[in-house]
Amino acid sequence: MDRVRELQDKIIKLKKEKGITILAHSYQSKEILEVADYTGDSYALSVSATKAPHDTILMCGVHFMAETVKLLSPHKKVILANPEAGCNMANQIEPEFVEYFKKHNPGYTVVCYINTTAATKTVCDVCVTSSSAVRIVERIENDNILFLPDRNLGAYVQSKVKSKNIQLFQGCCPIHAVVDVNDVKKARELHKDALLLVHPECDPKVVEMADYVGSTSGIMEYARKSDAKEFIIGTELNIAEVLAFEMPEKNFYLLSQKLICPNMRITSLVDVYKAMTGEGGLVIEMDEDTIKKARRCIDEMIRLGG
Ligand code: 13P
Ligand code: SF4
């Protein structure tokens, strides 16, 4: 038996023995996705977390995702598989900025992308994910919105919800934001019949050129259902790899070699195993006040997004 399969079997055995539910974001490697109980985009994972049958949840993804699980299930033990896995966008904004903005702009509803820390969420009004942002902003009663931290997802929402005054914080995902129009032109030149599927964290000029714009799960679903045979994938490399493995009859090309998120890549199968045995991983600790305040933001997301 190969080493990967051997380790996967040990993990599956440990899950049963210790009562651990494994959640894995779609950007995780194939061998991790195979041992997970739930996989998907940020929104799907946060909903799955509430349904997880066990008292311990292991998150294979980045820090804010594990925090979100803790907020939704505060009495559960939540472990991030690799303690170093942060999100560079989530760390671009501090709660102090939000407080400053609110003080000087009373009457605004502050909408934060789920890619934010729990501390930032404590001072925001409602959270969104890439798959629910447009729907939620449309449903917010207030017409004055501050959207943070991702200017690109915010611009995408602006383009879809034209009736509202949406101010954008100028943060971005350093992985998606650097893909440009030239990358699209080159990819289209090489793969003339391919459809371009992109994540809304990409630059608006790239988003405008796409055949489909959506979350990681949205992109995967689109590729599965489409009759087309070739796709250019404008999000993290792993999505293209997983799709290519799942559908060998179709061709998937990565829009740009820049689309590799080191934070999503650092979690290995060994990390998953060690986090389960207690030799590794990071147990998410959060005080009651943070849970209470940040949770409001997530509850609003579920209420408005459902
Ligand atoms: P999704 O919300 O589409 O899962 O994306 C999360 C993310 O970090 C994208 O870079
Ligand atoms: Fe964060 Fe960007 Fe990596 Fe997603 S791809 S986890 S937004 S740094």
Image (spheres, rainbow, N blue to C red):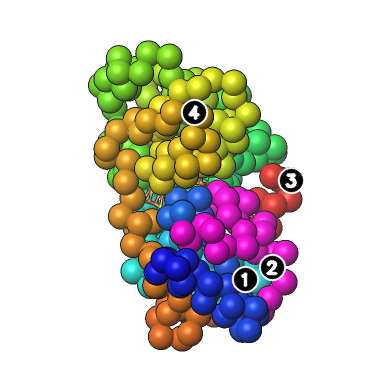
Mark 2 secondary-structure assignment: loop
Residue depicted at x 28% and y 25%: 183
Real-space Cα separation, disc 4 to disc 3, in angstroms: 33 Å
Q: Is residue 293 among the parts visible in the rendering?
A: no
Residue depicted at x 63% and y 51%: 44
- Residue at which label 3 appears: 306
- Residue at which label 4 appears: 250
Q: Image quadrant for the N terminus?
A: bottom left
Real-space Cα separation, disc 2 to disc 4, in angstroms: 33 Å
| 3 sits left or right of 77 in the view | left
Q: Amino acid at mark 2?
A: Ala
Asked if marks 4 and 3 touch (Cβ < 8 Å), the reply is no
Pointer 4: residues within 10 angstroms few (<14), some, or many (20+)? some
Along the polypeptide, which appears first: circle 4 or circle 3?
Answer: 4
Q: Amino acid at mark 3?
A: Gly
Dividing the picture into quadrants, the one containing residue 201 is top left
Real-space Cα separation, disc 4 to disc 1, in angstroms: 32 Å
Along the polypeptide, which appears first: circle 2 or circle 4?
Answer: 2
Image depth: mark 2 or mark 3 in front: 2
Q: Is residue 175 above or below residue 229?
A: below
- Residue at which label 2 appears: 52
Image depth: mark 3 or mark 1 in front: 1
Closer to the camera in the image, 80 or 186: 186
